[in-house]
Amino acid sequence: MYTSPRISTAVLLAALLGVYWVSQLAGLWNRGTTIEKIVFIAGGVLVSYLMLNGLVGYCRKGVRRLNEILETTSIDILLGGIAGLLLGIMVGVLSTYPLSMLRGWGHYLIIAVFLICGALGVKIGTSRASELFSLLPFWGSPAQYPAEEPDETKVLDTSAIIDGRIYDVCQSNFLDGKLIVPTFVIEELQHIADSSDNLRRNKGRRGLELLSKMQKHPQIKIDIIEADILEERDVDAKLVKLCKRLNASIITNDFNLNKVSELQGIKVLNINELANAVKMIVYPGENMHISIIKEGKESGQGVGYLEDGTMVVVEDAQNDIGRDLDVVVTSVFQTAAGRMIFTRKSREDHQHHAHHLESQVQAVREVNLYG
């Protein structure tokens, strides 16, 4: 049931007019009693209202689906479908001429042949559109106008928009093709931006601001399409269905959506995986300079971080918090949370630390001796 006042009023008026027209044709006003008239009008209006409201709902779904098809279909396929339909109608006219001479079932056969020829024409025209237009000299050959690869269209997920790094990735020219943001993703961002939780509200607003910023950037190709998968309620399920319809890949940071999309055969571009792939590579035996900022989990360990956020664990550095150390890489581990680098102090720092401890011990001895 649609709650729009304009639609509901129009449907109700149409139901009233329909009941009045039917009652006039049936002659109810001249034959029926008052109770029969009231029952007929009330029941007729109710049934007509429900039927018309359902019809309006189906029409709105059809229009929305048609808009989605028109926005996501190339001009070659649209023109190919129209050309195929016209050709199918011509074939139908020629083939149904003998059937027009038949009586009885001949007219029904004509309608069936027209429908079959038209459907076949549309199917052939859309599936062979590129080959058809490549034969036209003014349209250009495939070499002059290379077809866009199916996976060049990429659908943006809510998590990738909120993350914000997609803007920098687009500016670095690592992504080719067009970015698509469906309207149900924007609705989810608006819902997050209206949240009572301060953190979620800031994330939603930041995502909406980022979309506006990307739309204004001249080098970023991004389109917002009127698309809604009515048979699905979950946003992740809608994204998967949309990507399969458009033969597009998806950009996301969501672990669950990543796995579901891969199972459905959809190409996934994960920004977290990209960030891990471009981190600095280190090998055992390499030297690095690190600032110790806190204690490690194990006794005697100190922890620091590289600029890209990689955790560096330093042995025997628990007492060096706040100092900068030269360390040597001993091993590198890749975990689900990221990469960890284990190191030890370089020989110079180790000797300096030992000398520092010896000086402290000597000072304590002197205090005990003369104190």
Image: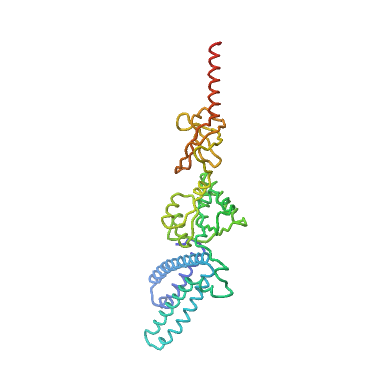
Name which residue lies at 50% across and 29% down.
318
What is the quadrant of the N terminus in the image? bottom left
260 versus 82 height, above or below = above
Residue 127: give x, y in percent of width and height.
Answer: 47, 71
Q: In terms of image quadrants, where is residue 215?
A: bottom right
Name which residue lies at 53% across and 34% down.
327
Outermost residue to the top: 370
What is the quadrant of the C terminus in the image? top right
Residue 343: give x, y in percent of width and height.
Answer: 50, 35
198 versus 363 height, above or below = below
35 versus 225 height, above or below = below
In the image shown, does 285 or 163 lie closer to the viewer? 285
In the image shown, does 109 or 119 lie closer to the viewer? 119
Name which residue lies at 45% across and 33% down.
297
133 versus 327 height, above or below = below
The total number of labels drawn is 0
Residue 178: give x, y in percent of width and height.
Answer: 55, 59
